[in-house]
Amino acid sequence: MKTVLVFGDFDLLHPGHYHLLRRAATCADELIVAVTPSSVIRILKKRAPLFSNKHRLGALRHMTIVSHVLLGDKSLGSFSVIEEINPDII
């Protein structure tokens, strides 16, 4: 079984996000999406996301091609999500 892990903010879901996830799903038996936490987006982009963590997680959970959605690491440089999931493809 192949596990694919995708990372992203997914603040405003747009056709590019759908394309990325559909393509990732073609390589996966299990597609897992790690959503960047709002606190990390503030650091990286110097602005808050438009939607809350809960909203962004919920929007992705409604996608049938996504097996599991989780909140990514809350600190920069941390790779605990990768260690926890141990994906075949990132």
Image: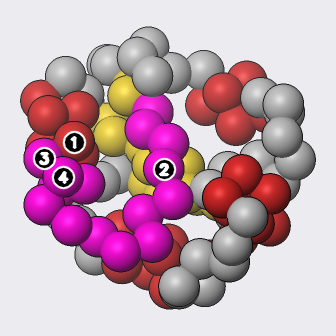
Looking at the rendered structure, the secondary structure element under dot 2 is strand
Kindly identify which residue carries mark 4: 16
Q: Position of residue 37 (x, y in %)?
A: 69, 63
The three-letter amino acid code for the residue at tag 1 is Leu
Kindly identify which residue carries mark 2: 8
Q: In the image, which is nearer the foreground, mark 4 or mark 1?
A: 4
The three-letter amino acid code for the residue at tag 3 is His
Q: Position of residue 8 (x, y in %)?
A: 48, 50
Does the residue at mark 4 contact the one at mark 3 (Cβ under 8 Å)?
Answer: yes
Does the residue at mark 1 contact the one at mark 3 (Cβ under 8 Å)?
Answer: yes
Tell me the number on the disc at residue 19.
Answer: 3
Range shown magenta? 5-19
Between the residue at mark 4 and the residue at mark 3, the CA separation in whole angstroms equals 5 Å
Does the residue at mark 1 contact the one at mark 2 (Cβ under 8 Å)?
Answer: yes
Q: Nearer the viewer, residue 90 or 43?
A: 43
Give the colouring mode of the picture: secondary structure
Q: Position of residue 34 (x, y in %)?
A: 54, 49
Q: Earlier in the sequence, mark 2 or mark 3?
A: 2
Asked whether the viewer can see residue 61, the reply is no
Asked whether the viewer can see residue 60, the reply is yes
Tell me the number on the disc at residue 20.
Answer: 1
